Amino acid sequence: MKNFAHRFTYTAVAALFAVASLTGTSQAQNNLPATPAAWVDAFKKDLDLAYQETLENHPGTHDPRNPDFRKNLETARSNALALAEQIKDAAGYQAAFNRFNVSLHDGHAGAQATLPPNLAPGLRWPGFMTVWRGDSLYVYASENAQPAVGAKLLSCDDKPVKDLIMENVFSFKGRSDEAGHWWYFARQLLIDYGNPFIKMPKQCVFSHQGKTLTHTLAWQPVNGNFETWRTRSYNGDTLPTGLTEPRKNLLWVAMPNFQPDQAERETLNQMTKEIAEHRDRALHADAIVIDLRENQGGSSEWSRKFADALWGKNRVDSLMRAYSPNSDVWWRASKNNTEYVQSLVTRFISENRTDTAAWIKRHADGMQAALDKGDYFYVESSTRPKVTAPAATKALPENTVELKTPVYVIVPGQCASACLDALDVFTRFDNTKLIGAPSSADSTYMEIRIKTLPSGLARVVIPNKVYVDRGRAAGQIYTPAITVTDIAWSTENFLKVVETDLAKTR
């Protein structure tokens, strides 16, 4: 099975579906509900369409390994409908769909409101930004020096901070059972997104340098500082795609995006080629840092190609066979899914990715054949013989020298989908050490498509396939060997972490 990273993540897919999103916004402008009752009616109709689209096309509906899928989908619809009668405007419409997604509990499925910009609720903040660092929220930056940078948030309005995060954040966003989502979503506690179903805090208690401070929140419209700090608080000063050498014999490989544009694709290919052709540089380096900050997935072909160049293709292939020796891919062969996968052939040809186009055409043809026969799934590897674990670990001849250089992989909390695929590969090697935050997790459902609803107010996210017997289980995260709790996730601070750890081994 070709390891085109077979998946577009919920977030990385945004650029791919920009046209559909804009179309939805244009439709929405012409179909805007004018009264609270109209918003309620619009939500109920769109929710029902999202439910039906998911039921008819999601692999889980007919997945024998997930017999509770239909029940969970029904529960998600019921939880969203419980809010429906309270909807008065666009903000309520959006929040109710967020409840549907949280209840569905799968980052590769659900529905998103696609509201015109003039209807999106205006963001507010209290003039400072918080960030999760393993056990609580801490002040990342503040416009007025109070609360101070580094101060720990203890409670708001007499509620412990973790309870409030569960109530105000994870009831509408993310998955609280994934450690990485605390690093990514918990910081939103003190950002007002206009959700009418929650009550924003008024007064919070912080601790700093042995003192306790009660701070009354001054809610205000966001500004330039907010936009800068919101991203940097969890990603740090992310670097552009490329290979640099911050000091002699330390290689820094920045991979912030596995859904690259043309320029980034060229850089990724050139970086991989340079590693392959000048491998002595990597073999004799003090350390190699693979920086995944900002990465939220895309296509795993990029990390796999780089791993092949760094460690040797035959070694990578052998270890991945041992990790997931009998994994199958079942493509849900509904009419809509099949047409979507067929459309990808043209897209990849236009991008001069002929190998990938040939790979996806083979599976599109398989889906069409299954659809014609009335089968629910086309099983990608049904003709491949199963292997035993000893056979899976047998290494092919490898002409490259074994890489023993320490490899540090910086993991952000939002790392999911193809970003997790990269970790699957990198962590097969004993010289790899993860640093940063715990990752997010995936279900076994991948390769999404997005359909804009007729109202133009929302779009549905549908995965097209399910992984069976994958080495990494559904919901499984990666935990770093070194958790980096510095308030600033700067390149400088990560470099210090690497240098400190290297010094211990010398």
Image (cartoon, rainbow, N blue to C red):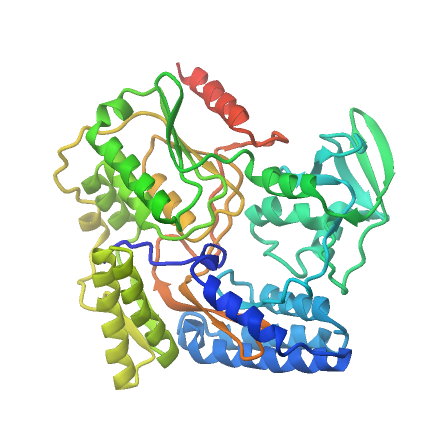
Residue drawn at x 32%, y 21% is: 285
Up the image or down, 422 lies above or below 312; here it is below
In the image, taking residue 475 as reference, residue 90 lies left or right, namely right
Q: Nearer the viewer, residue 115 or 237?
A: 115
Q: Position of residue 92 (x, y in %)?
A: 72, 69
Name the quarter where the C terminus is drawn.
top left
Residue 17 visible in the snapshot = yes
Which residue sits at x=51%, y=28%? 491
Q: Quadrant where the N terminus lies?
A: bottom left
- The quarter of the picture where residue 307 lies is top left
Where's residue 124, x and y in %? 75, 51
Could you say which is closer to the camera, residue 39 or residue 206?
Answer: 39
Residue 136 in view, yes or no:
no
Q: Quadrant of residue 425?
A: top left
Locate residue 369: give its quadrant.
Answer: bottom left
Task: Give the residue drawn at x 66%, y 56%.
Answer: 170
Image spot of residue 272 (x, y percent): 27, 37
Front position in the image: 475 or 286: 286
Q: Is residue 334 above or below residue 23?
A: below
